[in-house]
Image: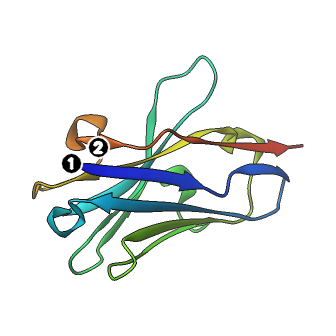
Amino acid sequence: QVQLVESGGGLVQAGGSLSLACAASGRTVSIYAMGWFRQAPGKEREFVAAIRWSGGSTYFVDSVKGRFTISRDNAKHTMWLQMASLKPEDTADYYCAATIYYKRSYYTSNDYEYWGQGTQVTVSS
């Protein structure tokens, strides 16, 4: 089992920055990749970014490329999502996720077995 806890959400003005953290505990040695998803009110959960635990390859949805950065610290079992140039459309609940299986890609919810509780990000215009 892997437990995930997000932190760092909040309210920010458009154009501002915010950093989210996801701390993993439990069976962290088995993690292959972690990712961030978001869900806005009335919308489906969507992929935001992912990072392979070994090697650090990163993946982003097109709408956040160039604005968001994903990173991880294997020793601290923590992943971060640094968000810059935030837009009102980035407003959503953000969830971190982890998988203990190797996969070709990590773009869908089905690619992950473990989920955090979520943290709210609100970007005001």
> Residue 114 at x, y = what percent?
29, 43
At label 1, counting other C-alpha atoms closer than 10 Å, the crowd grade (few under 14, some 14-19, many 20 or more) is few
Q: Element at badge 2?
A: strand
x 49%, y 38%: residue: 117
User: Which quarter of the picture shows residue 33?
Assistant: bottom left
Which residue is tagged 2? Answer: 114
Closer to the eye: label 1 or 2: 1
Asked if the residues shown at circle 1 and circle 2 are in contact, with their CB atoms under 8 angstroms apart, the answer is yes
Which residue is tagged 1? Answer: 1
C-alpha span from label 1 to label 2: 8 Å
Name the disc covering residue 66, or none: none
Q: Element at badge 1?
A: loop
Q: Quadrant of the C terminus?
A: top right
x 21%, y 43%: residue: 111
Question: Tag 2: residue type?
Answer: Tyr
Question: Tag 1: residue type?
Answer: Gln
Which residue occupies the foreground of this view, 97 or 57?
A: 97
Answer with mark 1 or mark 2, whichever residue precedes in sequence: 1
x 64%, y 22%: residue: 41
